[in-house]
Image (cartoon, rainbow, N blue to C red):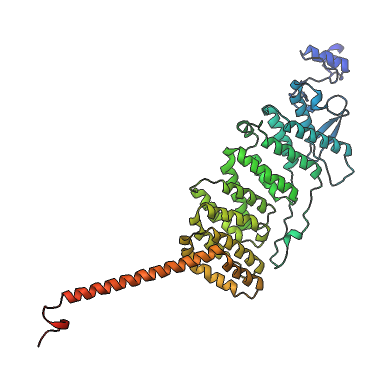
Amino acid sequence: MIKQILGRLPKKTGKAGDGRDAATANGNEPSNSYSVARSVEPGGNKRAGNGEHLPPAGSASTPAMNGAVVYHSNEPLPAFKDVPVSEKQNLFVRKATLCCAVYDFADPTKNLKEKEMKRQTLMELVDYVTSANGKFSEVIMLEISKMVAINLFRSSNPTPRENKAIEGVDMEEEEPLMDPAWSHLQIVYEVFLRFVASQETDAKLAKRYIDHSFILKLLDLFDSEDPRERDYLKTILHRIYGKFMVHRPFIRKAINNIFYRFIFETEKHNGIAELLEILGSIINGFALPLKEEHKLFLLRALIPLHKPKCVAMYHQQLSYCITQFVEKDCKLADTVIRGLLKYWPITNSSKEVMFLGELEEVLEATQLAEFQRCMVPLFRQIASSMNSSHFQVAERALFLWNNDHIENLIKQKFDDDELKQEESSSKREVLWKRLEEMGGESSPSGIPNGKSSQ
């Protein structure tokens, strides 16, 4: 009776040896480190029976900012050159997992050892991706995309530069905020850039991991205050656009949406100039004749970008995109010029000077037929600018007359008008002569001057 009662009581957890016996009895491999069954993942990471990751023996755990607990071995992972080729992929996975820890750089005294270990490991990943001599497997692609997402797609509170409508304010003089974690972020960007640019990256496989959701999060980062980050993003997105043809329409549409929100809602975004720089290269590669989709993009997104007060932040890139469209299809010149006149600044003299400069670039790519369609409202505005009380505006408007192409357009128009006038005069003379001849033929014979006798 007592034995039956004792048999129902829960048994106390056994020692390591008891655990090994229990594991063996259940058909599992014996373990020297843990008393629970675990499985080995491709990267060499251990996984417990309940699905949780287990640390390797002799390792310490470090809580990261992203909530994950990353285990750092007391001994550094071996270098890629020190392991056989068959083990390099597993080692890459372990190193990429190590780099998934995100640390707090606001306090430079915290986690110094872990930060340096991560930095060195990231540099090793850069070398591995750069020197790859075979197609990347899906395991590598998955680990890179996961590591990049954890490090880059972070919650941030962008602080866009305030829009200043005051004349003479140079927004480039403002000091941008630099991300204190850039020592790690830069290397993560470098890993991703070299992965996207590598000939060993198969776009058909990689598109499963660099998907629409990934691209949208990448585009969100363009609002970063740090210009170094935006510069990397610009290069990477351009590479993605070139490599992943399947994503091209989606990328253009997503950039469209960013512009719409910026123009009609917020007028605050730090990365408009970088996005326009990418688009300038994309527009340059458009095939002829231009698709209706591309013309609508010009009409609905690029031209309205002249509206925000902070247009000076991105005007150079915007002007290049506009000019590219006119050079591709000269028939768009009338649409562009009328769009410029629609958003022409009235009280902002520095902005008006920029508009006059862009107008000159557009007119240089304009042909006579399109020039004639818009010349009346165009020169009405130019005359108004020439009469401006601001000397820089008046001076810039007068400079238009020094442009040979604009001068030739005006001369061609004048010569055409003269020719039309001469043709009209000739036609009138021919018509009068014809009428006189008809009048002479209709007079009775023998009666001079067409008068009848009484």
The spot of residue 213 in percent (x, y) is 64, 40
Q: Nearer the viewer, residue 241 or 267?
A: 241
Residue 257 versus residue 438 in the image, above or below: above
**Residue 62, quarter of picture:** top right
Residue 436 versus residue 78 in the image, above or below: below
The spot of residue 404 in percent (x, y) is 55, 64
- The count of marks equals 0
Residue 301 visible in rendering: no
Residue 225 versus residue 54 in the image, above or below: below
Please report the residue visible at 75 percent of the width from the left and 26 percent of the height from the top: 51
Q: Nearer the viewer, residue 414 or 59?
A: 414
Residue 7 versus residue 282 in the image, above or below: above
Q: Nearer the viewer, residue 292 or 113?
A: 292
- On-image quarter of the N terminus: top right
Left or right of 444: which side holds 158?
right
Please report the residue visible at 58 percent of the width from the left and 42 percent of the height from the top: 248
